[in-house]
Amino acid sequence: MTSLRNFYIKLNGLSSALLLSRKLPCLITAGNKYTYYSWSSMTAVHHPLLQPVGRCLKSRHSSLHTSSVHCKNYYEILGISRNASQKEVKKAYYQMAKKYHPDVNKNDPGAEKKFAEATEAYEVLGDEDKRQQYDSFGSSAFNNGGAGGSSPGGFRSSGFQYQASVDPEELFRKIFGDFRSQFGQNEPDFAESDFGYKASEEVTIQLTFKQAARGVEKDIKVNVVGTCPKCQGSRCMPGTKAVRCQYCNGTGVETISTGPFVMRQTCRYCAGTRMVLPHPCDECMGKGQTVQRKVVTVQVPAGISDGQTLRMSVGGKEMFILVKVKPNAYFRRQGDDVHTDATISMSQAVLGGATRIQGIYEDITVQIPAGSSSHTTITLPGKGLKRPSSYGQGDHILHLRIRTPSSLTEKQKALFQALAELETDTPGSIAGFARTGDGKETSDPLHAGAPNASEQTAEQQQSWLQKIKKAILG
């Protein structure tokens, strides 16, 4: 007798395929229609010895039977579509597991089977990799070593055998917590959502230097725990309500008798709440609250520095806000003081004057004292940063930078030459001038590297005042 090998695969939208040995044709089924295909050409053929009977093959000379392998539709088990999101898969499993949990249906022998089927379906569809394999090859991909096998997590109930990589009870507790303490203190009183599984505890915000210096109102998106928008906090599906617990008769306490001993404890089904939810809200999982995304406004005080943390209450929960301040090319901060640079001309440095600079809150006019040198600092009291934790403000400290001209006109050069002749405290020498015995600079072509002293002109021997007049008036 030819041995049969059974595989269930997805073939171009066909429901299943029963592959025989390569000596026999291949039977492909689509709904209730059966078609034989040749292995060599994969064209439809009619085999006189084989007739389809249900899901088995029957020979006219000898009976050949296959063991009917049930191709489970996990999507139908959970009641969801094939393109359902992971959140919808989890919600569907939660509803099925709550409905058919063995602790709820102690007198229903079929509940345990449905609970196990739902767990098996979730173990596959709740895992992206397993779900992709299932969509490609069906549940047979898990018959050997996948969701099946001889894992110790398997059990038998009411003639149904389920073998999974984890125990159904353990999987349910891992996802949703202990069923008997679903309203206890160890489990959050809100449900996770697409935005996360808890409220925001720490958020980082980015500020510019001026925002940090002046203070700003910053809008940020955070996760908060709020009333479920679907059930409005009732924890029940719209149109339903909580009912009195039938296990403790609404007392919240159950009595357990063991021989002569009587023990009273909190009801394991309602967890002492006296009420149960026949139809819990599928949005908040019967919690009444969900994790939601909201926009909150943060009041950033003026003068806050980089790395400081703000604390505020959002949705009844305390949240910390870490402040990051971007560096500024103009302002430099040292404590509550702010430092900036100001570039002035040589004339302003020598004769004095005024310049206008950019302040934290407004532009400021600064008086430059005569005789200022480079790196001279001018302090502007009270023009710095506000002190967030106390009163008053720091100072604005201005650093002067003298700009030296890189090129001179003939008139400017004549003026500098005249000035050079009058200098008596020049350290070293000036190009084109020689120092006389009295310490003054004089124009000396010989010392300046002139080719011949006879080339001096009358103009070069004039006094410095005559040079200035000639340079200016011509």
Image (cartoon, grey):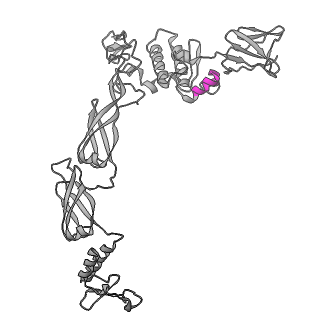
Q: Main secondary structure of the magenta part?
A: helix
Question: Which residue corresponds to the image point at 31% horizontal and 87% vertical from the top-left?
Answer: 458
Query: Is 253 placed left or right of 383 in the picture?
Result: right
Q: Residue 434: horizontal and vertical position, in percent?
A: 32, 87
Q: Residue 309: horizontal and vertical position, in percent?
A: 29, 44
Instruction: Give the farthest residue toward the front.
Output: 474
Q: Residue 33: horizontal and vertical position, in percent?
A: 71, 9
The relative height of residue 89 versus residue 423 in the rendered view (above or below) is above
Quadrant in the picture for the C terminus: bottom left
- State the count of labels: 0
Question: Which residue corresponds to the image point at 47% horizontal and 8% vertical from the top-left?
Answer: 107
Q: Nearer the viewer, residue 55 or 111?
A: 55
The relative height of residue 362 versus residue 405 in the rendered view (above or below) is above
Query: Is 303 placed left or right of 196 in the picture?
Result: left
Instruction: Give the farthest residue toward the left.
Output: 391
Which region is colored magenta? Answer: 130-143
Question: Which residue corresponds to the image point at 41% horizontal and 26% vertical from the top-left?
Answer: 193
Q: Nearer the viewer, residue 401 or 200?
A: 401
Q: Quick check: can you spot residue 351?
A: yes
Q: Quick check: can you spot residue 374?
A: no
Query: Is 293 placed left or right of 398 in the picture?
Result: right
